[in-house]
Image (tube, helix red, strand yellow):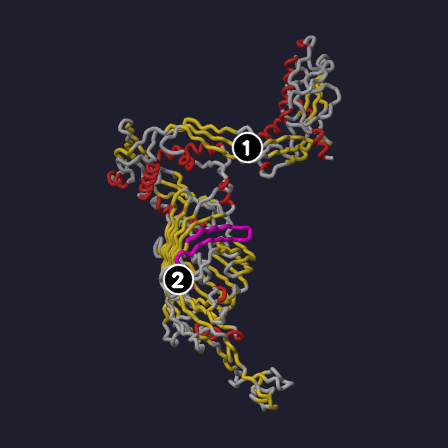
Amino acid sequence: MRAAAILLTGTMLAGIGSAAQAQRGPGARGGARSGAPAAPAQGLPAPAPQGATVAVSDPAALTIKTLRVEGSQRIEPDTVLSYTRLRVGMRFNNELLDQAIKDLLASDLFADAQIAGAQSGDIVIRIRENPIINRVIFEGNKRLKQDKIDKEIKLKPRQIFTRTAVRQDVARIIELYRRQGRFAASVEPKMVNLDQNRVDVIFEVTEGPKSKVRQINIIGNKVFSDDKLREQMATKQARFFRFLSSNTSYDQDRLAYDQAKLRQFYLTEGYADFRVTSAVAELTPDKQDFIITYVVEEGPRYKFGDVTVDSDIRDFDNKKLAASLPEKKGEWYNAKMVEDSIDSLSQTAGLFGYAFTEVNPEYQRDAEALTMGLNFHIAEAKRTYIERIDITGNTQTQDKVIRREIRLAEGDAFNSFQVKRSQDRINSLGYFQDKFEIKQTPGSSPDRVVLEANTEEKSTGELQLSAGYSSLERFIIQANITQRNFRGKGQELRLGVNYSSYSKSIEAGFTEPYLFDKNIAVGVDVFRRDYNSFNYLNGDRNTTYSQVSTGFQVRAGVPLTEYWSLAGRYGLSYDEVSLDRSNFYTNGVCDPLLAGRYLCEAIGNRWTSSIGYSLTYDSLNSRLRPTRGQRFSFSQDFAGLGGDVKYIRTRAEGSKFWNVGSGFIGSIVAEGGYIRSLEESRGEGIDKVRITDRFYLGEPQFRGFDIRGIGPRVQRRRYTTDATGAQVLITDRDQIVDDALGGKAYYLARAELEIPLGAGAREMGLRPSIYVQAGSLWSVTRPLSSAPFPTIVDSKGQVTVLGLNTPLTDDAGRQLYFVSSEDATNAGRQTTCAIGFSATAGGACAGGSTNVLATRAVSPFQEVYYGSSPRPRVSVGVGVNWNSPFGPLRIDVAKALVTQKGDDPKLVTFNVGTQF
């Protein structure tokens, strides 16, 4: 029924024209209707005629005898009269009555107004009030949600309906769509009349497609090509490969921005007279696309003339300052270089305590010689001091947490470098929104400055409940809760549980960054980790050894200087390393033929008590997502303060980040380590550093290789027979048992470039990058072979490797037998009797069956040792970080370019639901 009412009564606002002329009775004035019954409304109410004149026989002799209001429902009669100048006892004429009608209609409270009784002086004001809005409804809006439109329009439920407000809201909605690039959008307002003088207002929206930029034309350019100039613009031509970009839609504000970008580009290339004479955007007839045309004048190219500095501040040496500037006489003029020099001189002044220094470039243009001389005038300024530091916006974080990161105190001399450093340290906390800045405002006197830290807090608590899949651990269930700003004191509290088919762990930790409000950080971690090492055979992941670690670590750290810090730690852990007895044990002991000597030697339970330190240099602008700065760390851990393990482990890490320009972030990261045992030799062919304490390298650190995909390893290749019956080795990688042994030394380096994307991709959390990596893992004692298989040579000289049968014994070392089939009762049962049967081990044997010796057969294989080489492995690739709805996702496509024999390359790797 509602839809039928809309179709019956609705009409476009654009169709609202002049009102139908109504008949007037004697004495009626103004109004759209005069006493006649109202016709059914079609859409929105029509405007009432303004100030129609009714003849009065003798206006000068007429006086208002009585004055009353008819038709008022919500509005009091006195309120209606207050909008007119009519009062009882006053004389009136046609102009006064017409003006009264105009005043009533101008109030936007009334849909119609009439005046009767002008001939007798008994004035009656008949009004029809504007209706009340019951609901405001939108139909057809998909790209622009109703909550966003509601913030922009004036019409609201329970307000008075006016045609003026409808027109304004239609224009506003269309403007919102144009900002989205939808210039073909149209809005048709309709209304549905309800009882009690109420209406529903309905906006029928036709959104239309986004108006793309079909073509960008440039006229007048001779030095640079159209493509080169289009590269400088934010607006891009719509092409199929830019389907993720939001810059292909037309934006009027962006048009002005692009003109500024063109001028900026030409100014950096020396064309100081460049200008854009016109910029026109034409909408195609179908309203689908825009064609933008720029007309430019390039002008001549200038070179730098004499470059000088004129400082009114006596502390500065003008010649030295001029010599330090990048502008050199005879080089092409570059306006960007001039701006950088202004910033550099301002920062230099800031280092000396001058907060509000004016640096004005004075140009000496020579149009004939085409040179641009420069004089940087540094105005006289007073040395400034910090009057106070204001911190606002922090509702949870305590003031002291922020103030202790600020490298200046109230009363100190101003220093621009320390202000920037303070800003970086606060950003690194991760408690506040990005782009936090410390602003400088004048203080109470010219030599005072106020620092304002206007913070905007963001959530610092994280609760992650996820199930995912990774190429490392297959199916994963993970629960983590972290509060990085516990109680607003900057403390970190975390608890994590991880469960997968091959690893289980629970960890808890607490860090206090400022113990007793002193610059001393302390922390403690407790953990239990259950990890299963593995290899692959026929594509199946097979568990080799199991390692269960339980322990804790206590940490403490102090700063040495602004950038250097020293941290110490003590850890105690208990490791239980075991192998599956049913698969790798024979006669109660680990069998090297089944497990390998390198795994058998790892078995055992041991305590590790270690103490360590780290020396760190950190000038990164952010610890969470750095874009500039560098970091270096050197650490050592000594195990042997009690316990069963003795070694010294040394590691070094370094990284450097910088802004390449245009949103590109470059980085170089390198690390390396070495572990040396402090124990005596553990036997021939046994490395003194246990397999569980060594370094490993591969996915995810070294992209392009599988997990533990490089470094020392032992491969077992079994024998099979070919079509001729000859014995051959299996070479298929999926059918080779491949055990990584780890190494005592490694290095790894990566050069990476993060590529900026459009606003739409950034909102999705996409961060792609390209990179190249190089690294190696080596230095482990070559293990002894576990494969002493006998061989035979036939008459043709062909060698055949035979398998081994190992006799089986019970726990007491007694030989075991299988009862022969001659014994109908106990055939196939295991016994210690060579003849007959005894249900009790070592008991009396009864019967005369000759039993079969119980053995474990091991098929012949070849054991090959690979990978202990410091020669670099190299890979190149592209990766994408994505904050997906399923959790953080990292996808990498990396190609291993340089490998060593035995390495295990991998082209595509990904992780979902885990941190990376």
Q: Which circle marks residue 109 in the picture?
A: none
Report if residue 66 is visible in the image.
Answer: no
Q: Mark 2 points at which residue?
A: 900
Left or right: 39 as drawn, with respect to 831: right
Q: Earlier along the polypeptide chain: callout 1 or callout 2?
A: 1
Q: Quadrant of residue 332?
A: top left
Between circles 1 and 2, the one closer to the viewer is 2
Q: As displayed, is residue 677 above or below residue 75?
A: below
Q: Can residue 71 be seen here? A: yes
Q: Is the magenta stretch mostly helix, strand or loop?
A: strand
Query: Which residue is tagged 1?
Result: 288
| Residue 177 in picture, x, y percent from top left | 56, 34
Spatial CA distance of label 1 from label 2 is 57 Å
Q: Residue furthest top?
A: 58
Under mark 2, the amino acid is Gln
What range is drawn magenta here?
876-902
